[in-house]
């Protein structure tokens, strides 16, 4: 029996229920448990309470830091490879580079967001703009009167209206909003893009049998939307397919988290 852990959300419930069926088809019995947050998930994985974890990027680097023998990155969503943070402004803005943000107003995503919170903050500082001293003002989604709109959609709306001069959004959000005709090319302009980095991942304990790991990898990458169960899993996880995991692309997140004192 393989025990999979994740954080409590409706999408994870829907995905994990489907994974139980898909794993069983390949002769693997899967059980799952949901935790109140990523720190609880990290503790459960490190203490070997679970065999696998569906990690966010920060929880993965926390696990890496706490384990002397690194865990295995089994699989990722296709959208989690070469993830990118964009800085956007109005189409006719005079902002062309990060340096042009001096004394401007900047909108971050939520404080808990890696792509539009932690990394956006890190990328600004790494490029010579200290948000606390160089910007006229900045806010996180948590501090704005945002109603029910998502944090990145809120950033886009506030940049479009001119309330903020620029803001941080992810490549995935821009892609989805444009595909759904919720964002026109003329609404905003990307003026800076980060290097690609890795995002979320399924990890397994290092001592898991290699042949079992390979079978689990094949289970993930064989999931297709042509199968109703597979389609439900992919929809729940908002991706087109799963791909093999990678140990690369996490370095920037680890450095940023180190600087903010989030890992030790």
Image: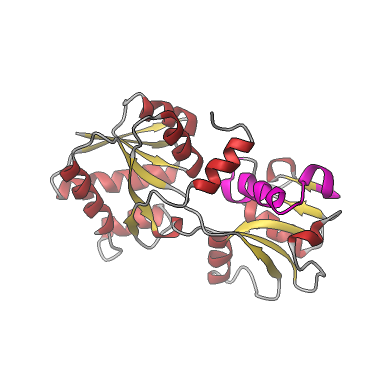
Q: Is residue 246 left or right of residue 176?
A: left
Kindly indicate the quadrant of the structure image that contains residue 167.
bottom right
Q: Is residue 40 left or right of residue 96?
A: left
Magenta highlight on residue 150: no
Residue that lies at the very extreme toward the top in this rendered image: 47
- The residue positioned 39% from the left and 33% from the top of the image is 34
Magenta highlight on residue 114: yes
- The residue positioned 32% from the left and 59% from the top of the image is 231
Q: Is residue 245 left or right of residue 259?
A: left
Kindly indicate the quadrant of the structure image that contains residue 144.
top right
Q: Is residue 156 left or right of residue 7?
A: right
Task: Please determine whether, in this image, residue 36 is positioned above or below residue 141.
Answer: above
Please provide percent x and percent y for residue 125. Answer: 71, 48
**Most common SS among magenta residues:** helix
Judge whether residue 109 can be spotted in this image.
Answer: no
- Counting labels gives 0
- The residue positioned 43% from the left and 43% from the top of the image is 10
- The residue positioned 40% from the left and 60% from the top of the image is 78
Judge whether residue 240 can be spotted in this image.
Answer: yes
Task: Please determine whether, in this image, residue 124 is positioned above or below residue 88.
Answer: above
Quadrant containing the C terminus is top right
Colour scheme of this structure image? secondary structure
Please provide percent x and percent y for residue 261. Answer: 61, 31
Please provide percent x and percent y for residue 16. Answer: 32, 43
Quadrant containing the N terminus is top left
Please provide percent x and percent y for residue 60. Answer: 44, 39
Q: Nearer the viewer, residue 237 or 106?
A: 106
Residue that lies at the very extreme toward the bottom in this rendered image: 186
The stretch in magenta equals: 112-137
């Amino acid at each position: 029996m393989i025990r999979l852990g994740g954080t409590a959300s409706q999408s994870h419930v829907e995905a994990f229920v489907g994974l139980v069926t898909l794993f069983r088809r390949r002769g693997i019995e899967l059980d799952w448990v949901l935790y109140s947050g990523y720190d609880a998930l990290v503790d459960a994985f490190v203490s070997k309470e679970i065999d696998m974890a569906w990690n966010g990027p920060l929880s993965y680097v926390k696990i890496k830091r706490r384990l002397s023998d690194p865990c295995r990155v089994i699989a990722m969503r296709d959208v989690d490879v070469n993830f990118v943070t964009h800085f956007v402004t109005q189409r006719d803005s005079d902002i062309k580079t990060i340096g042009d943000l001096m004394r401007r107003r900047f909108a971050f995503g939520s404080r808990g967001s890696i792509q539009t919170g932690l990394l956006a903050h890190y990328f600004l500082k790494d490029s010579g703009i200290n948000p606390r001293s160089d910007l006229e003002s900045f806010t996180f989604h948590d501090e704005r009167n945002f109603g029910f709109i998502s944090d990145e959609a809120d950033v886009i709306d506030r940049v479009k209206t001119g309330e903020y001069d620029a803001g941080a959004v992810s490549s995935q959000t821009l892609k989805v909003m444009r595909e759904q005709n919720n964002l026109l090319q003329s609404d905003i302009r990307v003026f800076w893009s980060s290097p690609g980095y890795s995002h979320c991942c399924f990890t397994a304990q290092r001592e898991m049998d290699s042949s079992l790991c390979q079978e689990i990898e094949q289970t993930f990458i064989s999931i297709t939307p042509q199968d109703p169960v597979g389609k439900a899993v992919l929809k729940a996880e908002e991706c087109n397919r799963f791909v093999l995991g990678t140990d690369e692309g996490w370095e920037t997140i680890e450095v940023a988290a180190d600087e903010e004192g989030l890992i030790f």
